[in-house]
Image: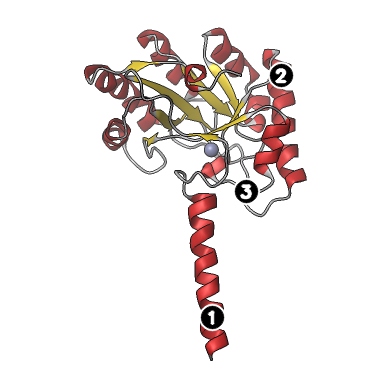
Amino acid sequence: MTFVVAAVIAVLLLGAWFAWACVWPYSTFFRPVLMRGPADGKRVTLTFDDGPSEQFTAQVLDILREQGVPATFFVCGRNVEARPDLLRRIVAEGHAVGNHTYSHPFVCFKSQRRIAEEIDRTQTIIEGVTGARPCVFRPPYGARWFGLVPTLLERGMRMVLWSAAGYDWKKGAAGITRAALRGLKPGAVILLHDGRETRPPTEVDRSPTVQALPAIIEGARQRGYTFAPLRDFLPAA
Ligand SMILES: [Zn+2]
């Protein structure tokens, strides 16, 4: 009986540790990781995950161009293969590109080899389109695992999570705007999505994000924030 109780407690503790260290986006158990930039000055940075996407990346780019705001796009290799032209436009318009794996797997419990394959395949695809290999990586779902950190360190890549989320996977435009603005602090890294995590032809509707974006930019500026490129938040190499 005592053994059963001890086993149940051990399983619960292990589960709690896993949820905190590997899944909760604000845990720093796996390091190095950037969640927020320097707190000096009122600078924030925008990031978009899961693109490029057929319908929504161009709309996001139009708004960013109109507003003169730089951003970082954490793209999936599979989506780049489908729309390399959109990745070329991202770079041509002065935005940065990050690696978000090839097929958007949940990295927990994956081998280091499997994680490395996802990263390397995407680095090669991005380099083939843009001529450069990204130095930043964001894990799908913000999940982290043991093989991930050494893989990134070997490649001189930095893991970037976020400190302000628009929760655009579940909220409408007004809710996205409120959530993103609520998370603003000096150095905030804002998480939004311009693409889909699932295999085509399943398309995720990102129109709430597109609708929210001008209001997020305007709201941040009204609060005295300026938009900086992510590279300004990274320690000098
Ligand atoms: Zn993602």
Residue at the spot x=27%, y=17% of the render?
221
Residue position for label 2: 127
User: Which element type, helix, strand or loop, lies under badge 2?
Assistant: helix
Vertical side of 59 occupied by 4: above or below? below
Q: Quadrant of the C terminus?
A: top right
Q: Residues within 10 Å of mark 2 (few under 14, many from 20)?
A: few
- Which SS class for mark 3? loop
Residue 6, label in figure: 1
Q: Residues within 10 Å of mark 1 (few under 14, many from 20)?
A: few
Residue 207 picture location, percent across and down: 39, 30
Left or right: where does residue 129 sit relative to residue 89? right
Mark 3 is on which residue type?
Trp
Q: From this view, report whether residue 95 is shown above or below residue 164.
A: above
Image position, residue 181 (x, y; %): 28, 30
- The first of marks 2 and 1 along the sequence is 1
What amino acid is at disc 1?
Answer: Ala
Spot occupied by residue 235 in the image (x, y as percentages of width and height)? 54, 22
